[in-house]
Amino acid sequence: MVIVQLRDLLFNAFHGIHEEEKILGNEYVVNASMAFREKDEVIEHIHDTVNYAAIYNIIKKRMSIPTPLLETIVMQAGNEIHTVYPHLKSISISIRKMHPPIEGMQGAAEVSWQKDF
C-alpha cells in the first residue's frame, strides 16, 4: 500500500455559519491522505501514483468556495479526488479552523472525513 499525504496546507477562507466569518474569514489548515495499492514493485512514473500537485489544486479550488459547514468541504473535496483517482482505496481529509468565533475558546475546531473504497 502506498500512502500519499499533503500536510499543513494553509488557507485563508470565508467558511462558516456566522456572518462575521463570511466577511472577515479565518485561517484553515488542511491535511489529506490517500492510499492505493501499487501495481508494480517499484513506482517510477507519475501516472502510476497520485500527483500531489493535482490533489493540492483540488483542495485549493474547494477551499476558495465559501461554505457554511466544514463537513461539506471535506466530503466534496474527497469525492472529487476519488473521481480523478478512482484507484484510491482510502481518502482522509481534515480541516482545522484556527480561530473559531466562540467566545472564550482558545484553540481550534477541526472536522475530519475518512472513506474506504
Image (cartoon, helix red, strand yellow):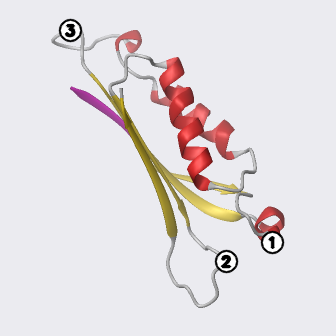
The residue where tag 3 is placed is 40
Q: Tell me which residue sits at (74%, 44%) in the image.
A: 65
31, above or below 29, in the image? above
- Mark 2: amino acid: Pro
Q: Which mark is residue 101?
A: 2
88, above or below 33, in the image? above
Q: Between 22 and 31, which is closer to the camera in this rendering?
A: 22
Q: Viewed as shown, does residue 23 lie left or right of 54?
A: right
Tell me the CA gap for discs 1 and 3.
51 Å
Q: Can residue 110 be seen in this view?
A: yes
The tag earlier along the polypeptide, 1 or 3, is: 1
Q: Between 100 and 50, which is closer to the camera in this rendering?
A: 100
Tell me the CA gap for discs 2 and 3.
48 Å
Q: Of all residues shown, which one is farthest toward the left?
A: 41
Residue 96 x/y as whole percent: 52, 61
Please state the extent of the stretch shown in magenta in the rendering.
1-5
The residue where tag 1 is placed is 20
The tag earlier along the polypeptide, 2 or 3, is: 3
Q: Residues within 10 Å of mark 2 (few under 14, many from 20)?
A: some
Q: How crowded is mark 1: few (under 14 residues within 10 Å), some or many (20 or more)?
A: few
- Tag 1's secondary structure? helix
